[in-house]
Amino acid sequence: MSQNFIVTKEHRRFTEFANAVRADHTIGICHGDAGVGKTNSARRYAHWDTLEPYLQAWGPRIDDDAKHNTLANRARTVVYTPEVLPRHRELLRDIDRWISRLGNCVDEHQRTSGKITSTRVGDTTRWVELLIVDEAERLTPTALELLRDRHDRTQLAIILIGMPGIDQRFRHYPQLYSRLGFSHRYRTLGREELLFVLDRHWKRLGRTLNPDDFTDAQAVAAIERITRGNFRLLERLFPQINRVLKINQLETITDDVVEAAASTLVIGT
């Protein structure tokens, strides 16, 4: 995902939102329809596609340690997705493990870069500044209270990511709601941004998009109608478009090609 990541306006807005939550040591909510790119942006912000497998494997030191420690120092952010019906003790243990490991990486970077000269190792979890919880609808009232308590005691900034309406749900928890500093709605792609993303996809397929060309304009209109600017649907659609082009030995992406590709996908209405 990180190699082919397309930086959109919505991703930049998410980055600004996350930076604000992090700087103010507060709790924020990010909500938006399924597939608009919330999770992708969170993982990109935290360099989680690179750091997660490294932290998960956690073992003897390897040659790549310095690279991962540098990323950890830059991100200082943990992305966590709770299980369905999470057990509260396990949820806290999982979060503590991720924060501890990331904090150790940041601490190691600080020492190797000469920013810390003391040999005494303190509480390395202090280096972690932000916890992003994806699929926050899965959290029970007790789990939310535990996270609020963690925030109160440690000033750890927290972002809760969920579907539309999650902000209204949190109104029922006054102690949590009173601590919310920011709310961010992650929107679908607008027309100009859709063209920007489609231009990238055309190039990946070795083609050039010309919105003024009638055939290209028809294809764009078909994609816009089918995906309604949903980022995940776009990502699912283009591998199928490539498959249709190869099978039929076609060179041009037309509306018929788009329709044929879309017919192989399960797309909600």
Image (spheres, rainbow, N blue to C red):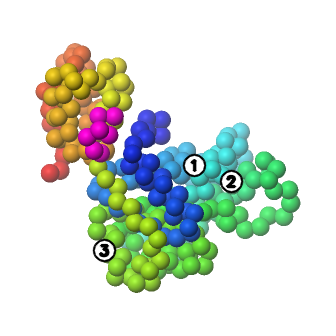
What's drawn in magenta, residue-wise?
189-196
Q: Earlier in the sequence, mark 1 or mark 2?
A: 1
Q: Which numbered disc covers residue 105?
A: 2
Tell me the CA gap for discs 1 and 2.
Answer: 10 Å
- Which residue is labeled 3 in the image? 168
Q: Nearer the viewer, residue 124 or 53?
A: 124
CA neighbours of label 2 inside 10 A, class few (<14), some (14 to 19), many (20+): many
Does the stretch in magenta take in 220?
A: no
Question: At 56% from the left edge and 69% from the top edge, which residue is drawn?
Answer: 25
**Amino acid at pointer 2:** Cys
Label 1: which secondary element:
helix
Left or right: 264, with 139 as reference point: left
Q: Which numbered disc covers residue 51?
A: 1
Question: At 43% from the left edge and 41% from the top edge, which residue is drawn?
Answer: 7
Q: Are marks 3 and 1 in contact (CB under 8 Å)?
A: no
Tell me the CA gap for discs 3 and 1.
Answer: 33 Å
Check the image and report above or below for 101 versus 7: below
The picture places residue 53, in percent across and down from the top left corner, at: 55, 48
Tell me the CA gap for discs 2 and 3.
Answer: 37 Å
**Amino acid at pointer 1:** Leu
The picture places residue 87, in percent across and down from the top left corner, at: 45, 74
Q: Earlier in the sequence, mark 3 or mark 1?
A: 1
Label 3: which secondary element:
helix
Does the stretch in magenta take in 192?
A: yes
Q: Residue furthest bottom?
A: 174
Q: Are marks 1 and 2 in contact (CB under 8 Å)?
A: yes
CA neighbours of label 1 inside 10 A, class few (<14), some (14 to 19), many (20+): some
CA neighbours of label 3 inside 10 A, class few (<14), some (14 to 19), many (20+): few
Q: Earlier in the sequence, mark 2 or mark 3?
A: 2
